[in-house]
Amino acid sequence: MSFPLYFSKKIAFSKDNKNNLSRVIIFIGRLSVALGIIVSLITVSTGFGSKKAIKERLADFSGHITVRSTRSNSSYNTSVLDNQGLDLKKIKELPDVASVQKYATVTGIMRNEHNFAGIIFKGVGKDFDSLRFKKFLIAGTSPKVTEKGYYNGVTISQKIANDLHLKVKDSIVTVFSKADQKPIYRKFEVVGIYRTDIKMIDDQFVLGGINHVRKIQDMKPDEIGGLDIFFKNVNDIDRNMPEIEKLIGYKNYAEKATEKFPQITDWISIFDTNIALIIIIMLIVVVINIIMVLLILIIERTNSIGLLKTLGASNAQIRATFINYTLIIMVPGLLYGNAIGLGLIFIQKIFGVIKLNPENYYVSTVPVDLNPIAIISISLGILLISGLALIVPSYLISKISPVKAIKYN
């Protein structure tokens, strides 16, 4: 064991620290480190958790990547997906693809004696991923479409259900209009109610059978309006986008889930700035406190420094001793900070104690993401940066004269 490390341990675990100013200074240093760790862990876990939760909700409802005809543009009345150049078989065979479902959409108005609601009727087929959709259900079931005949069940959002005073097994009339034609009326039975907490989705979308949309849009029995492509992981979107674009033909276009609602994407991007800003602020606070601890410990142990110099210790060895001493002081703060921070995060993850307004935050509870790499990086980063920050103030030791230091009282 090197002399600086050995001597720094002797000082750190000395009984003298329990009866002098060191006790207060050490407590302040450890408290600042613990608070820095707690705030950083909560900031990172909730920031990344919110980004992930919102992206997953967007993607799990409408597909990680959606393929549509270029003729559809931004219209909610989808045009027929062009088959020229579209290789559905190869898309399904991509390693990251979990499932692909066909759909078609048309706009309409649901109405009854209580109210009315403008909707986007999303017709799905027998390949609808009901298992993925199940997380959004709060009552009833998702559509059970076989594509044989006309399935008259619909799954509506809680927002639409509340506006129209509907519950499962109620009937509702929907009006669809076409240019230069009489309105088309359809009577549906509510088989399920869902909630995504994404306002743009919950305010508009109703799920039902695709054959209704085909009939209204004058589509052939095998024609569709688009494809929802789901990946095994939401983070696979960017990596697979170029390959998907090669397999859909030039008359169709692919759109990422995060691009469908740019206002949400812009809001999510704010998390990165906030996370970085909070961590930088906490790091500055921790570093300032640790430097203060080092300087006070140097002043308090001036006699020891003079004695070490008299016995032949170099300035570099003494600086290393006090830097090691300060870093050892930080370790309990790191441990307590991680224990408390992770404890609070686990409580939120399991019990969802802190609630949010989904209209403003797109989620009803504060989501957390326990990323081991981020957790370890925060602790190691604070320890490393603090160690580097201590190098410059430790040069104060070289200014201390051995003779004056020994006389110092």
Image (cartoon, rainbow, N blue to C red):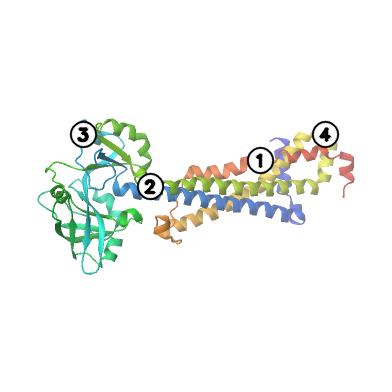
Q: Nearer the viewer, mark 4 or mark 2?
A: 2
Query: From mark 3 to mark 2, how far is it between C-alphas?
Result: 26 Å
Q: Which residue is mark 1?
A: 387
Q: What kind of element bears circle 3?
A: helix
- Marked residue nearer the N-terminal end (3 or 2): 2
Q: Residues within 10 Å of mark 4 (few under 14, many from 20)?
A: few
Q: Residue furthest left?
A: 149
Q: Nearer the viewer, mark 1 or mark 3?
A: 3
Q: Which residue is mark 3?
A: 89
Classify residue 101 by image quadrant.
Answer: top left
- Marked residue nearer the N-terminal end (1 or 4): 4
Q: Which residue is mark 4?
A: 312
Query: From mark 2 to mark 1, how far is it between C-alphas?
Result: 38 Å
Query: From mark 1 to mark 4, how far is it between C-alphas?
Result: 25 Å
Q: Is residue 324 above or below residue 106?
A: above
**Residue 269, x across and y down, in percent:** 46, 45
Residue contact at pointers 1 and 4, CB within 8 angstroms: no
- Along the line of sight, the residue nearer the viewer: 306 or 96: 96
The three-letter amino acid code for the residue at tag 3 is: Lys
The three-letter amino acid code for the residue at tag 2 is: Lys
Query: From mark 3 to mark 4, how far is it between C-alphas?
Result: 78 Å
Q: Residues within 10 Å of mark 2 (few under 14, many from 20)?
A: some
**Residue 229, x across and y down, in percent:** 27, 41
Q: Nearer the viewer, mark 1 or mark 4?
A: 1
Q: Which residue is mark 2?
A: 55
- Marked residue nearer the N-terminal end (2 or 1): 2
- Identify the residue at image location x=68%, y=40%: 389
